[in-house]
Image: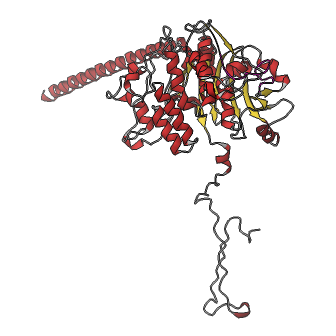
Amino acid sequence: MLTSISKEKERSLSFLCCWYLGRRRFAMLLLLSLAFVVFILGSYTINKESNNSPIIHQSIETIDFVSNQTPLTRELSSFYTDSGSDVDIIHPPPSLPSHHPCDSFSFPPPPPPGLRRPGPRPCPVCYLSPEEALAHMPKHPFESPVLKNLTYVHEESPVKREEEGQGGSEFGGYPSLEDRTNSFDIKESMTLHCGFIKGTKPGHQTGFDLDEDILPEIDQFHDVIVASAIFGKYDIIQEPVNISEMARKNIPFYMFVDEETHSYLQNTSSYSDDNRRVGLWRIIVVHNVPYTDARRNGKIPKLLLHRLFPNVRYSIWLDAKLQLVVDPYQILERFLWRTNSSIAISRHYRRFDVFVEAEANKAARKYDNASIDYQVEFYKKEGLTPYTDAKLPITSDVPEGCTIIREHIPITNLFTCVWFNEVDRFTSRDQLSFAIARDKIREKVDWSINMFLDCERRNFVKQVYHRDVLMNMKPPRASSSSRVLPEPLPLPRGKAGKKIPGQRGKRRHRKVSAGGRNMR
């Protein structure tokens, strides 16, 4: 009797256990099924959103910081700290079209202190794809404030009259101080000095002469061009990379060189006189350069590109020490079209004040110190003051002028003309004359320059050394793994080639390093 009761209890307990475990398994299966369904639905939704959203191309390089305020941290500190100037005042958010792919872009947080390195570095930039960037090109030109018609002085025999305060060169036409003052009096129609004083057209009998066969080519219409120059074989041509097929087909790349640089190119295998090209660059040879200083000659195409290419809408200027690593359409969309700007230039990564820049130029012996002092004193008498926060929203008085991105309209043409006239009259250090030319125009009209961060400039160009530095560089030291060891000493021997006593019976193998004389 007791045995049967105990058996029934065991059966009921086993039944309850099986029933309980079955419910748990069923519940687990049900939960897993629900989770799988949610995962499938979520994946479908994300896939659908990603397919409907435009592609955002971001070129993100390493951002480095140090705790003792390096130039780059000073430049980017406003993005990561609450101290200092308000970033919204310095960089107001651009008026982006609705649902612009980059409107949610922000700088990433700084790396940990242990990974921070000193020195200027690239920072992230949000680019559209080249096709999307081209679609954002404005249909109509940027409106030039006040100034609508700009013409240039032409004179076949300019004469310099010291008593009238004339300065500059014959190529610039020796503008007087009165001419200089009038060039900042902005009107609807203006005529001013802007180089190429002589000749029938820029590049023809002007003192900066081009070959006859190139003149019709530079008169053609182009939406965008990229230009650079090498004079005095000072640099080595850098081939652009990451250029889209669309840009290769539609955007000409022009490289101005003097006869000395052209002779050097003729001795290289990458250049041919038949098509006068080095990679993407179309070589334009300049004859009868107006200055003995190669760097001053380089300021002519840099600042007067609108005079050489009268039918171009947009241009990107690069100093020859730079290699372009981002598509031109992406650069124009990011720094002009997205910000509704007519000209963009990066500010210096370290210096923001003209007076500090002048002292740095003197310390580095960039130019004759007396000429720099004369120029700075002249600007001080005209009202130039050291840079302070009171000049906001102007972010800097010193540009990093190796890149200029601009639309060719009357107001930007006027700016680069008066900037060139300052370079022609004073020193060739264009960083010193940038602020005075900009500020005098801004006093008259509502116009500004997009002075973006220098770390953003370093995102789309790669800087290399000048040719003279590269030629004098010592070859890198071989690493320890590839170092060739010296020839081992011969085994000690006695007279007549006999072995020294005590060595008999011991056989030594001579070690021979890789590439040694005894290797066969």
The answer to which of 315 and 386 lies nearer the viewer is 386
x 65%, y 77%: residue: 509
Q: Which residue is outermost to the right?
A: 274
> Which picture quadrant has residue 296?
top right
Q: Is residue 321 left or right of residue 145?
A: right
> Which picture quadrant has residue 408?
top right
The answer to whether any part of residue 56 appears in the image is no
Q: Which residues are magenta?
A: 192-206
Asked if residue 193 is among those painted magenta in the image, a careful observer would answer yes
Place of residue 100 in the rendered image (x, y in percent of width and height, measured from the top left) = 50, 12
Give the quadrant of the N terminus.
top left
The answer to which of 82 and 486 lies nearer the viewer is 82
Q: Which residue is outermost to the front?
A: 163
Q: Is residue 327 left or right of residue 157?
A: left
x 79%, y 32%: residue: 288
Report the colour scheme.
secondary structure
The answer to whether any part of residue 189 appears in the image is yes
Asked if residue 211 is among those painted magenta in the image, a careful observer would answer no
Q: Is residue 346 left or right of residue 117?
A: right
Q: Is residue 488 left or right of residue 64?
A: right
Place of residue 58 in the rendered image (x, y in percent of width and height, measured from the top left) = 53, 25
Number of labels in the image equals 0
Give the quadrant of the C terminus.
bottom right
The secondary structure making up most of the magenta span is loop
Place of residue 515 in the rendered image (x, y in percent of width and height, measured from the top left) = 71, 65
Place of residue 26 in the rendered image (x, y in percent of width and height, measured from the top left) = 33, 18
